Amino acid sequence: MDRSRGRHPRAGRGPFRTPGLALVLATAAACSGRPDGGVSDEALRCTEIRPGASPLRRMTRFEYNNTIRDLLGDDSAPAGAFVIEEEALGFNNQAAALGVTQLLAEQLMKASEAIAARAAQDLERLLEGCDPAVQGPEACAAELIERLGKRAFRRPLTATELERLERLFAWGNDEHGFSTGVELAIQAMLQSPHFLYRVELGMPDPAGEGVVPLSDHEIASRLSYLLWSSMPDDALFAAADAGELRTAEQIAAQARRLLEDPRARAAVANFHAQWLQLTNIDTLSKDAAVYPRYHDGLPALFRAETEAFLDHVVFEDEAGDVATLLTAPYSLMNAELRAFYGLEAPADGAAPPGELEVVPLDPSQRAGFLTHASLLSVLAKPDQSSPVHRGKFVRERLLCQTLPPPPPDVDIQPPAVRPGIPTRRQFERHAQDPGCAGCHRLMDPIGFGFEHYDGIGLYREVDQEVPVDASGEIVGSRGADGRFDGAVELAHRLAESDEVRQCVATQWFRFGYGRAEQAEDECSMSQVQQAFAESGYNIKALLVALTQTDAFRYRRSGPGAGGEP
């Protein structure tokens, strides 16, 4: 058995509905892993293939828009009208939370009708040279259905599926004409669970008791949705058709190719936006009386800076590693961001308006994304900084430790701003309150390290006319414990922590696989962590490593294994 298997630019008729076609509402549950981000202590023999459960995964709005664009050339982003996904483990792509409500089912149906209608308006592009007047409408429709259906379902269609879609076309063609027949066939494809979900049945021959290898086309989909958040391209389809996604080396080669495509940058940015809570910038609100330099145009600039920085580190920086994400003494800014941060314009002239360029920072004040205004403003209150939110972020997002919610009888309102009393002193009362001290000792001492930054991320030496005390401490970790002074020192401590490096890999595992880690994943997790370490904790190497595991290449079979609609 093979087991190897520089600068940043920045009219009128109603829809035809499929007769008798029911939108299949399918969902699956993912199992929970340990809340602290670790894996089970169960001793597993890594010579055996032990993948965790592979829950059925529905496309997110982001994936749906990308797939429609790559399938039909439609960049209208129709999923913007869909209900927002629920989050689990900090991400919106977790299979357990991606159920289908009646409202979403209706939205999916309406979207399929509108998308199909637009597609059918450009038959020349769809038919790719087949002329119904010459080859006949049935022949052209059959060729289109086979070709487009394969791309929509990410695998060749079965004879039964082809027959059903051709019958549907024939009904529309007979009743309303060729264009309508095509429109109805596309509608049916887009409403099928084989389009909306990543259905995985596996190969017919088991790889061990209760385990089946995924098919080449299923591997192709796993690759493209992990690294592009979209469907496979022609080269990936060709590799699947040729049976060239069977070995670890073949899969790794394709993963590296996909990472060189611009679509990988958008997919990685989507991960970062959720992991680092950048999506919360869209609803940012600040008190203008407290922060007169704040204006409504800043949130978009904050987000642009952090997104460009993260993209640069992962795809342009020579190291491209976790340490650089956390400690880089540079960022990417335009003239307006420079002015906000109080940085002088370069002697040789700034980048063109709106264009972001690499800007060196004062290494005593800024280091990596933790000191970006985006993160600091999101992890703050409208009128003050928030040691609680900032400490909780480090604890959960960088150390992978889950903190329990406060007891229901505890007042969670932050202390009001009081003239002459700095934020730190206001929040230190948590240590004296028995109902608060247990959890806040895990958050506040970390959050105090960010007190050199106000609620919009500006650096300060005084708070309420009192010199800032930014000393802090990490306790209760698995190796990052210790005292530090300020966020820059904290960032360097975190960058040297194996726990943080392991957490980054765990966060990518959860996002990439759409589920929590499980006991059966211990060997896969160990393999990923080892490859990550051997690469110097390079992020692109981590993404390739995620494609090499049993959890990626195999699925469990039998009841409760998931993967089927």
Image (spheres, helix red, strand yellow):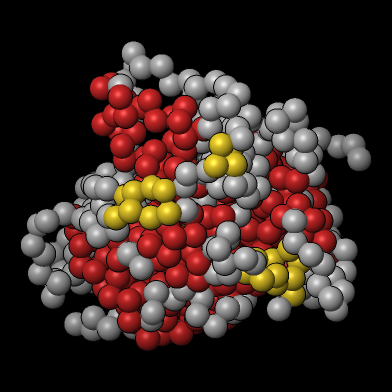
Camera sees residue 359: yes
Instruction: Identify the residue at image location x=23%, y=56%.
Output: 478
Viewer-proximal residue among 475 and 229: 475
As drawn, 112 above or below 356: above
As drawn, 308 above or below 37: below
Viewer-proximal residue among 503 and 415: 415
Classify residue 431 as left or right of residue 348. left
Question: How many discs mark residues in the rendered view?
Answer: 0
> From this viewpoint, which residue is outermost toward the top?
409
Instruction: Identify the residue at image location x=50%, y=47%.
Output: 450
Residue 348, position in %: x, y? 85, 78
Instruction: Identify the residue at image location x=45%, y=31%.
Output: 425
Where, quadrant-wise, is the N terminus in this rendering? bottom left
Residue 457, position in %: x, y? 63, 47
> From this viewpoint, which residue is outermost toward the right?
11
Viewer-proximal residue among 98 and 559: 98
Residue 509, position in %: x, y? 37, 60
Residue 153, position in %: x, y? 53, 60
Classify residue 382 as left or right of residue 334. left
* Residue 232 position by quadrant: bottom right
As drawn, 297 above or below 14: below
Viewer-proximal residue among 363 and 206: 363
Instruction: Identify the residue at image location x=50%, y=22%.
Output: 415
Camera sees residue 270: no
